[in-house]
Image (cartoon, rainbow, N blue to C red):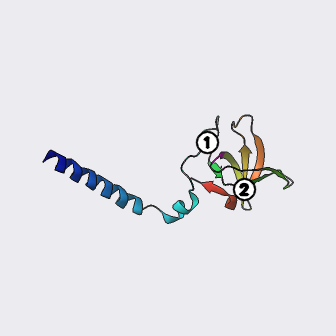
């Protein structure tokens, strides 16, 4: 009888989890891809990060491509936004990162 109660409770928890997830904003679900996101280290408090997609290009101030991602879900710290472009810092460490720009349509937002 205890086994039946445990199975019933697990079933109820699973059902509640599925129901809860069905209410998530569908627009957010479109932007998220994959499951492992790598954040940049030494990020200033209160800053936002965006994440690469395969093929995301990073530009310098003259709009020359300085880097193209071949891996998804790698974090970049946003330092500004203007005309559909994020100003970002590229690299695994914010303090030693390279400034650049990415198109807001080419990154994932959490």
Whether residues under marks 1 and 2 lie with C-beta atoms below 8 angstroms apart, the answer is: no
Q: Is mark 1 on a helix, strand or loop?
A: loop
Residue 12: quadrant of the picture: bottom left
| Mark 2 neighbour class, 10 Å CA radius: few under 14, some 14 to 19, many 20 or more | some
How many marks overall?
2
Q: Where is residue 6 in the image (x, y as percent from the top left)?
A: 21, 47
Q: Which of marks 1 and 2 is in front?
A: 2
User: Residue 45 lies in magenta, yes or no?
Assistant: no
Residue 74 highlighted magenta (yes or no):
yes
Q: In which quarter of the image is residue 92?
A: top right
Label ID, residue 14:
none
Q: Which residue is drawn at 85% across and 54% down?
A: 64
Q: Is residue 43 above or below residue 73?
A: above
Q: Which residue is drawn at 67% across and 45% down?
A: 77
Q: Is mark 2 on a helix, strand or loop?
A: loop
- Residue 16 is left or right of residue 89, and the answer is left
Instruction: Kindly report the secondary structure that dominates the magenta region of the rendered protein.
Output: loop
Dot 1 or dot 2, earlier in sequence: 1
Q: Residue 55: give its label.
A: 2
Q: Is residue 66 above or below residue 24?
A: above
Residue 69 pos. (x, y %): 72, 50
The residues bearing labels 1 and 2 have C-alpha atoms spaced at a distance of 18 Å
Q: Residue at x 36, y 59 (%)?
A: 18
Q: What stretch is highlighted in magenta?
A: 71-75
Question: Which label is found at residue 39?
Answer: 1
- Residue 56, image x, y percentages: 72, 55
Please state the horizontal and vertical placement of residue 15, each as a whole percent of the image: 31, 58
| Residue sitting farthest toward the left | 1
Left or right: 63, with 21 as reference point: right
Q: Quick one: label 1, few (<14), some, or many (20+) residues within 10 Å? A: some
């Amino acid at each position: 009888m205890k086994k039946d109660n445990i199975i019933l409770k697990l079933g109820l928890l699973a059902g509640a989890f599925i129901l809860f997830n069905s209410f998530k904003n569908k627009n957010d679900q479109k932007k998220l891809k994959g499951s492992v996101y790598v954040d940049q280290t030494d990020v200033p408090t209160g800053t936002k990060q965006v994440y690469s997609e395969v093929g995301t290009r990073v530009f310098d101030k003259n709009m020359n491509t300085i880097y193209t991602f071949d891996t998804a879900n790698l974090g970049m710290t946003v330092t500004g936004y203007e005309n559909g472009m994020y100003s970002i810092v590229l690299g695994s460490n914010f303090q030693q990162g390279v400034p650049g720009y990415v198109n807001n349509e080419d990154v994932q937002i959490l």
